[in-house]
Image (tube, helix red, strand yellow):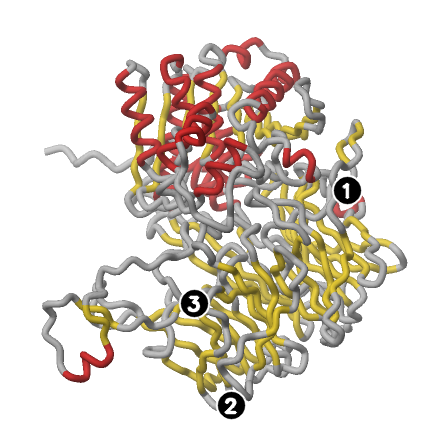
């Protein structure tokens, strides 16, 4: 008998694994006691999970970086936090009991001093899951300056609810809610479901105790807590949930204020002082080193779009007065090489450590056109400097920069640790300091590639896995800019990736719509360029962040028209740039969320222009989405205008509103669509219900349009579980290759 056939990898798998393994997905770091610590998240394609690695390295001075020690964070450790001096380390663990999957994990908190475990406390019966990292919204985990306490946000433990026919003991009767087992509990939507209640808690190291902080008003949810400099107070963000909770992830405009809670109040139930009564939005508080001021991001006036122009403010804790360091910019200057300073666009908030030790300057990341930039701001006068690494740093002018942390090296020099990358380079980390009126840059040794994927036994290792950097060889990139021909002014930018021999063009409008595709490394598009041999065009249409307030506000009420026109204009510019007849006849479009919405419009309004499409969790029929999404405000504001939604009440849509929404929806053009279309949906998506894509798929099939639907049962809006993400992009590459006839 012959031997069984040997297992073989699909030819595109090494490309995807290499692109993912090149990525440097770094969280915010810490720099204390002359030692830098960074955490890196890595896709494990075999186990379908994210693995976390810690890089620790000495930084004796701003120009010297020692070798890194790399260690994997155990899977049960869901969060770690070094103390300000680096002497202590907090670990949050999620421990699965012996009862199996049906039994909820128990949260446990540990405090370490070097190799010594000094405190271990089970949170069972005290609180539920620690909310430590939720896209800069509800999360919070912070040491006190004296390193005696930790403040954090966690889910509360609900009273046990039972059905009416449940037989209960006398003790159970006093502790349970009869008939409440199926009562609806509101939450903050996408990625934040599972609990209707969050609270402030303090871990006291010496007392070995965890206590809830009383006094939080009933109509708010606490978030992002930080200690005051004397460790006696807690400044936190209070999100209002009146009249209802709306989706919070990616939505920074939700009404919120800064409040001050005493750690040991005389009256535990007394409501906390509101520190920012004149701000409609105030979040991301950061206390200065000497403790007299709090820097934060906010806005004096409310805005209807999920992301908007922000002010950088500083609050004096003595007189409770806030002043604006950097104000909103309505219309930045436009010139041939780009735009002038567009204001602060930092939906992810301020870095956890952003103050220099003198308290005279702040560092932050902000979107500037298509480029994520790093700014250094003077606290006294609001003076602003843009980080521009010296020529010997060998970084492209439009490289994406992001602050990881600010701290002191071993010789007490103030340093800012920055991550950099480009669309065709995974980048690395550098240490930036300010000396003699100029920025000094020192690169940190490369963190290395991590391709976590096994190959079949006996098969030779594909070259892309052995040397993944070869994946990017020959791919060039540039930023395209043009003033739109349609009314309203502003500027459109595109990021064009071009392989050596482009066989076609893939157009990628971003989601949001009030976000932007950055000039940073994105593994999925590096993969797509290599796998298809096509050029990739990212379009930052008007309404994107980083181009001024006026440009952003042009889009609400004009979706499906203005953004579509901008994408088409930039596509024509890219075609001229590529100057090849093959690119004019082979054009695909790929988009997710609002990008999927635009892809649906493009193949409907321009059926002869696009030869293949891939839509991820797209909005296709706004009227049928408005009552079931976690962001009903989006449906009204984006389709009808900035004043179309009343945030102070909740009123179902009337026939006129529904008609306006339908007029802006891709389903309006269903009968014109001819383009073969791939749809990918997350079945647990709270933002854009999967019913949107399912309805669209059936409608296309009924009209004879070649279509395929991928449904991922455990994924949310982003489809970002490693195995689902990989499958999704592999399918996109295969679909485009087939229907663009590459």
Q: Residue at x 43, y 77 (%)?
A: 109
Q: Which residue is mark 3?
A: 198
- Of residues 483 and 8, the one drawn nearer to the viewer in this rendering: 483
Q: Are marks 2 and 3 in contact (CB under 8 Å)?
A: no
Q: Earlier in the sequence, mark 3 or mark 1?
A: 3
Residue 685 appears in the rendering: yes
Q: Residue at x 16, y 36 (%)?
A: 3
Q: Which residue is mark 2?
A: 206
| Among the 4 quarters of the image, the one containing residue 659 | top left
- How far apart in space, not on screen, are marks 2 and 3 (Cα)? 25 Å
- Of residues 519 and 8, the one drawn nearer to the viewer in this rendering: 519
Q: Which mark is residue 481?
A: none
Q: Which mark is residue 341?
A: 1
Q: Earlier in the sequence, mark 2 or mark 1?
A: 2
| Among the 4 quarters of the image, the one containing residue 726 | top left
Q: Secondary structure at mark 1?
A: loop
Q: Quadrant of the N terminus?
A: top left
For the residues carrying marks 2 and 3, which lies nearer the camera in this image?
A: 3
Instruction: From the top left corner, tell me how far across and down residue 55 is, in percent.
Output: 56, 63
Q: Taking 335 as reference, is 387 above or below it?
A: below
Q: Secondary structure at mark 3?
A: strand
Q: Taking 383 as reference, is 678 above or below it?
A: above
Q: Residue at x 27, y 67 (%)?
A: 104
Drawn side of residue 8 relative to residue 172, left or right: right
Instruction: From the top left corner, tell me how far across and down residue 226 is, in percent.
Output: 59, 71
Q: Taking 480 as reference, is 277 above or below it?
A: below
Q: Secondary structure at mark 2?
A: loop
For the residues carrying marks 2 and 1, which lies nearer the camera in this image?
A: 1
Drawn side of residue 690 relative to residue 345, left or right: left
Q: Residue at x 32, y 46 (%)?
A: 684
Drawn side of residue 371 relative to residue 711, left or right: right
Q: Quadrant of the C terminus?
A: top left
């Amino acid at each position: 008998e012959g031997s069984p056939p040997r297992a073989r990898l699909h030819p595109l798998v090494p490309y995807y694994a290499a692109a993912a393994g090149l990525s440097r997905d770094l969280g915010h770091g810490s720099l204390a006691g002359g030692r830098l610590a960074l955490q890196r998240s890595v896709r494990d394609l075999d186990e379908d999970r994210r693995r976390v690695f810690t890089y620790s390295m000495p930084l004796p001075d701003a120009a010297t970086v020692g070798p890194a020690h790399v260690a994997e964070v155990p899977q049960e450790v869901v969060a770690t936090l070094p103390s300000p001096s680096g002497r202590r380390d907090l670990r949050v663990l999620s421990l699965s009991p012996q009862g199996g999957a049906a039994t909820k994990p128990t949260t446990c908190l540990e405090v370490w001093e070097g190799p010594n475990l000094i405190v271990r406390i089970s949170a069972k019966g005290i609180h539920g899951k620690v909310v430590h990292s939720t896209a800069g919204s509800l999360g919070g985990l912070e040491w006190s300056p004296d390193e005696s306490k930790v403040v954090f946000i966690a889910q509360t433990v609900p009273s046990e609810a039972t059905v009416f026919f449940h037989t209960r003991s006398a003790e159970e009767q006093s502790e349970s809610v009869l008939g409440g087992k199926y009562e609806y509990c509101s939450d903050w939507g996408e990625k934040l479901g599972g609990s209707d209640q969050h609270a402030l808690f303090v871990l006291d190291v010496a007392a070995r105790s965890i206590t809830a902080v009383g006094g939080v008003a009933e109509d708010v949810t606490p978030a992002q807590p930080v200690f005051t400099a004397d460790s006696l107070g807690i400044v936190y963000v209070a999100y209002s949930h009146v009249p209802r909770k709306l989706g919070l992830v990616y939505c920074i405009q939700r009404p919120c204020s800064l409040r001050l809670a005493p750690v040991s109040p005389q009256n535990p139930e007394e409501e906390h002082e509101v520190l920012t009564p004149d701000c409609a939005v105030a979040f991301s508080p950061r206390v200065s080193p000497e403790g007299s001021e709090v820097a934060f991001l906010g806005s004096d006036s409310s805005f209807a779009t999920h992301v908007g122009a922000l002010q950088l403010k500083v609050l004096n804790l003595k007189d409770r007065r806030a002043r604006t360091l950097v104000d909103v910019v309505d219309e930045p200057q436009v010139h041939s090489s780009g735009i002038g300073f567009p204001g602060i666009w930092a939906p992810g908030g301020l870095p956890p450590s952003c103050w220099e030790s003198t308290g005279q300057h702040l560092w932050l990341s902000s979107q500037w056109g298509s480029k994520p930039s790093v700014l250094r701001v003077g606290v006294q006068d609001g003076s602003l400097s843009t980080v521009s690494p010296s020529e010997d740093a060998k970084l492209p002018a439009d490289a994406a920069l992001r602050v990881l942390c600010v701290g002191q090296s071993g010789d007490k020099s103030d340093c800012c640790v920055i991550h950099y990358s480009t669309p065709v380079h995974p980048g690395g980390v550098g240490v930036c300091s300010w000396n003699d009126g100029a920025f000094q840059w020192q690169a940190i040794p490369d963190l290395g590639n991590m391709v976590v994927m096994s190959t079949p036994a006996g098969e030779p290792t594909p070259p892309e896995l052995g040397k993944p950097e070869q994946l990017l060889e020959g791919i060039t990139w540039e930023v395209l800019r043009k003033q739109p021909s349609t009314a309203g002014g502003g500027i459109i930018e595109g990021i064009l990736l071009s392989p050596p021999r482009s066989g076609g063009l893939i157009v990628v409008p971003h989601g949001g719509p009030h976000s932007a595709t950055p000039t940073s490394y994105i593994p999925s598009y590096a993969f797509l360029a290599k796998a298809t041999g096509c050029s990739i065009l990212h379009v930052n249409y008007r309404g994107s962040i980083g181009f001024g307030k006026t440009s952003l506000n042009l889009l609400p009420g004009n979706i499906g028209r203005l953004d579509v026109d901008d994408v088409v204009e930039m596509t024509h510019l890219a075609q001229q740039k590529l100057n090849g007849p093959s690119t004019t006849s082979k054009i695909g479009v790929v988009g997710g969320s609002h990008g999927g919405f635009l892809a649906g419009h493009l193949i409907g309004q321009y059926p002869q222009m696009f030869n293949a499409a891939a839509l991820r969790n797209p909005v296709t029929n706004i009227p049928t989405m408005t009552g079931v999404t976690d962001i009903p405000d989006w449906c009204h504001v984006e389709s009808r205008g900035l004043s179309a939604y009343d945030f102070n009440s909740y009123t179902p849509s009337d026939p006129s509103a529904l008609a306006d929404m339908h007029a802006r929806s891709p389903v309006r053009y269903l009968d014109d669509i001819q383009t073969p279309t791939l749809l990918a949906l997350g079945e647990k998506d709270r933002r854009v219900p999967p019913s949107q894509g399912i309805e669209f798929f059936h409608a296309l099939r009924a009209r004879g349009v070649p279509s395929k639907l991928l449904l991922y049962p455990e994924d949310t809006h982003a489809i970002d579980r490693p195995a689902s993400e990989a499958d999704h992009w592999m399918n996109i590459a295969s679909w485009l290759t087939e229907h663009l006839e590459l």
